[in-house]
Amino acid sequence: MTEWPVAELDPVRRMRVLASALPGGGFAQARIEAPFERVWGYLADLDRSIPELVGFLRRFELRGDGTAVATGLVGNRGRFDVELRDGWCVMQDRFVVGGFAAVADGDATLLAACGAVRTRGLRRVVPLVFGDRIVLRTLGRIRRAVERSDQEL
């Protein structure tokens, strides 16, 4: 019997693969000059980090069953399926999918993010919402949040 080769991908490479499979989505990657534990500690606290990073969300409440409820600025609500583990987070509802991935890079952290609209008709406006530039801007917000937490220590 022939053994098929297996390719192991770290979370950042897996996020790049996920992003390439999402039609019309955005992807960005950045090196953040902070240890993995601090960067991922901020991101994994979804109840705090997601409303800070996504300007049109007022609350994001992670539940113990792998779901979360997002509340928009005008009170609209959506239920998300969430896969969260060390260095990997993917969140999706029926309209959008997005996520973060991180790996240690020496004393720094390599961080990636992606996002896409799942609704076929809305994909034409996706570059306005989830283009690479917007995802890169989100990584900048993460960098600033981690720097703020470093100053508070």
Image (cartoon, rainbow, N blue to C red):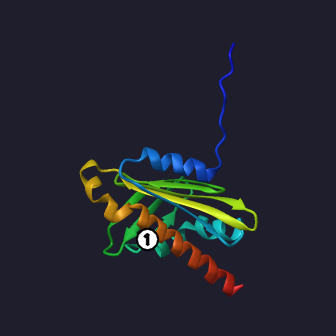
Residue reaching furthest to the bottom: 152
Question: Quick check: 21 left or right of 34?
Answer: left
Q: Residues within 10 Å of mark 1 (few under 14, many from 20)?
A: some
Q: Height in image: 100 above or below 17?
A: below
**Residue at screen point 43% across, 71% down:** 54
Residue reaching furthest to the left: 121
Front one among 53 and 124: 124
> Dividing the picture into quarters, in which one does residue 112 lie?
bottom right
Secondary structure at numbered mark 1: loop
Count up the numbered dots: 1
The spot of residue 24 in percent (x, y) is 35, 52
Q: Is residue 48 visible?
A: no
Residue reaching furthest to the right: 106
Q: Give the residue at mark 1.
A: 54
Q: Height in image: 146 above or below 110?
A: below
The spot of residue 43 in percent (x, y) is 59, 67
**Residue at screen point 42% across, 66% down:** 133
The spot of residue 38 in percent (x, y) is 69, 71
Q: Amino acid at mark 1?
A: Val
The spot of residue 109 in percent (x, y) is 67, 65
**Residue at screen point 55% across, 66% down:** 46
Q: Is residue 13 visible?
A: yes
In what quadrant of the picture does the C terminus appear?
bottom right
Front one among 47 and 56: 56
**Residue at screen point 69% across, 13% down:** 1
Question: Quick check: 79 left or right of 37?
Answer: left
